[in-house]
Amino acid sequence: MSSERLKILTANADIPGIETFEVYRKHGGYTAVEKAVKTMTPDAVVEEVKKSGVRGRGGAGFPMGMKWSFLAKPEGVPRYLVCNGDESEPGTFKDHWLMKTIPHLLIEGMIVSSFALGANTSYIYVRGELMYVVKILEKAIAEAKAAGFLGKNILGSGYDLELYVQPGGGAYICGEETALLESLEGKRGNPRNKPPFPAVKGLYQCPTVVNNVESISTTPWIVNNGGEAYAAVGIGRSTGTKLISASGHLKKPGVYEIPLGITVNEFIYSDEWCGGIRDGHHLKAVVAGGSSVPILPAALLLKTANGEDRLMTYESLADGGFATGTMLGSGGFIAMDETSCIVRNTWNFSRFYHHESCGQCSPCREGTGWMEKVLHRIEHGHGSMHDIDLLVDVSKKIEGNTICPLGDAAAWPVASAIRHFRDEFEWHIKFPQEATRPGAVYRGHMELA
Amino acid sequence: MITEKPRIQFTPERLERAREILTHYPEGKQKSALLPLLHLIQEQEGWTSPEAMDYIADFLGIKPIEVYEVATFYTMYHLEPVGKHVIEYCRTGPCMIMGGEEVYAHLKKKIGADDGETSPDNLFTIKPVECLAACGWGPCFQIREKYYTHLTIEKVDEIIDELKK
Ligand SMILES: Cc1cc2nc3c(=O)[nH]c(=O)nc-3n(C[C@H](O)[C@H](O)[C@H](O)COP(=O)(O)O)c2cc1C
Ligand code: SF4
């Protein structure tokens, strides 16, 4: 079966030496650059990306072609393309894998996309912890440049492009696109107030497009095969394929390229993908799209509240809204079996958001601190029933009241954990001695899968 | 008696690299080089001392406070001296549920240092960090640029014993 699947990003990932220009080129690499700069206009490339329906893979799922068409083009002002390789959302490691495995795919995508947008200088911002990946990308850029695919007058087309890799300094918030731009300007990563949006005032106050690593990496295939061919894969508005970062208690964690539209059940249990839950254990809960999205108990993950099979698409995962659904997000799929403590995990995530809040807005700065503190005391056997309501209250006060979406991202995991696992929180409060025994996990649970 | 500290400056190779980095940005936007240059000086000096920050401020022609406020915002810059190997372990959910807590407890016991501390032999500093984007390969830690993944207690023993040699 697996050999028949269309792989848009990873078809050549297993070829030895694919990280080198020579091997990448031999397997059809950089043909999209040739096709674009020699036979297409920039607008024609934008048109194909629009037709593909590809949605931003960084988490928000905004249609990439539409974003590109918003880019302001005032005369005499440079435009920038900035690739977001900050990847710091817990559960997500696909961009890391893609950049280190097939670096030239991103470089080729950056050239094609920069050409489409009329950018002559572009940056790939990579989280600083991935310094070894920065070096892999820099090597790939040097190789592409030596072969005439970067620099002045690319392939004799008259189009110039310089491409640079910029390391971050360690801060999740720099994944937020305006914080990323601040960081790239050599400042603290404080998100900017919007509007103005980056499409109008971005890097150095110039029009800028920010796209995720995976989003940009789809563009060579789209240029080669056409936007319609891309849109033919997937279901409805979830077109194409998506990289899923699978982690947790699965037989085969890893990065998988799935056609959007397979069932969640198939993704977890089929040998083609994760191969099921580790031996002797059962699925309890899943965070399906990175730490920011609502956690779901196994039953609600596999089937919607209406009893339909849940699909790996933006729409199906969101079915039921926050009451019974979640989000595809960045595709960070964290599977937890019955040995996982939901309270401990929620506390862990709260600590993450508290640690990563940039501190500009008081609801986020103070609220994430409160949530961490209250969750810590419930987990450690000092909670009261009132604390559960307090958490819900704090999460509501953060949501929607902040400059950037980190506040929401911190609130949702807490609110959803309480929504679906309230009995487990109550157990920690009613039976603190039992709950704080090393290795103790709440067993009186709802259905496992 | 006041002894003059040796002035910090880039080694010749790093100076060349630093000058190359400055060319990445448009004229007048050289402050953009701040994060990469801080990495470069920390790689050389082991940590980001006040003198190192002042040197970078000087190098970029910006005020020292512009460097301090940035260096203190990001987690990767060590603002205090560290041991020879800084072990940055991922404490976030996906690594935790894969047994991270036990593995890291063993690690700390083995090297004799707790979170934020340096071992008595000055070889290791322990730093808990948030998600390292290696969730499917956890538990994991990082030492300088190298990732160590799929950690177990046995694997930690091997890695530490090797580094002690
Ligand atoms: C707190 C926060 C962290 C984010 N982290 C990332 C990230 O690591 N990588 C990423 O591509 N997008 C991240 N985003 C989304 C970006 O703001 C932006 O929407 C995205 O880079 C746009 O690219 P796309 O449309 O191709 O997805 C983050 C957003 C927020 C609010
Ligand atoms: S929501 Fe949080 S992270 Fe975002 S700008 Fe406000 S304080 Fe900073």
Image (cartoon, grey):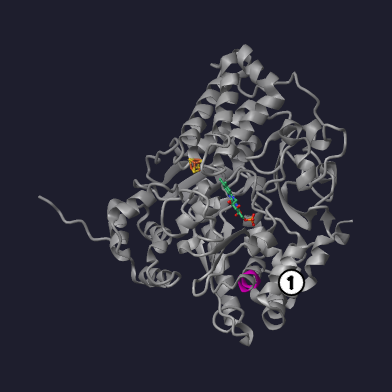
Q: Nearer the viewer, residue A400 or B139?
A: A400
Q: Position of residue A384 (x, y in %)?
A: 57, 14
B4 to B105, vertically: above or below:
below
**In the rendered view, does A235 fall on the left or right side of A27?**
right
Q: Is residue A176 visible?
A: yes
Of all residues shown, which one is farthest toward the bottom? Answer: A156
Q: Position of residue A82 (x, y in %)?
A: 56, 63
A427 to B108, vertically: above or below:
above
A260 to A251, vertically: above or below:
below
**In the rendered view, does A47 fall on the left or right side of B82?**
right
Q: On the image, which quarter does residue A397 sit in?
A: top right
Label 1 secondary element: helix
Q: Amino acid at mark 1?
A: Val
Q: Position of residue B113 (x, y in %)?
A: 43, 37
Q: Is residue A16 visible?
A: no
The answer to whether residue A114 is magenta is yes
Please name the residue that numbered disc 1 is placed on: A223
A336 to A44, vertically: above or below:
above
Check the residue under mark 1 and report the chain it is in: A
Residue plotted at (83% across, 40% down) = A310
Q: Position of residue A112 (x, y in %)?
A: 65, 72
The answer to whether residue A365 is magenta is no
Q: Which residues are magenta?
A: A111-115
The answer as to whether callout 1 falls within 8 Å of ligand 1 is: no
Assess disc 1: are there few (<14), some (14-19) or many (≥20) residues with their C-alpha within 10 Å of its C-alpha. many
Quadrant of image for the C terminus of chain A: top right
Residue plotted at (67% across, 30% down) = A416
Of all residues shown, which one is farthest toward the front? Answer: A74
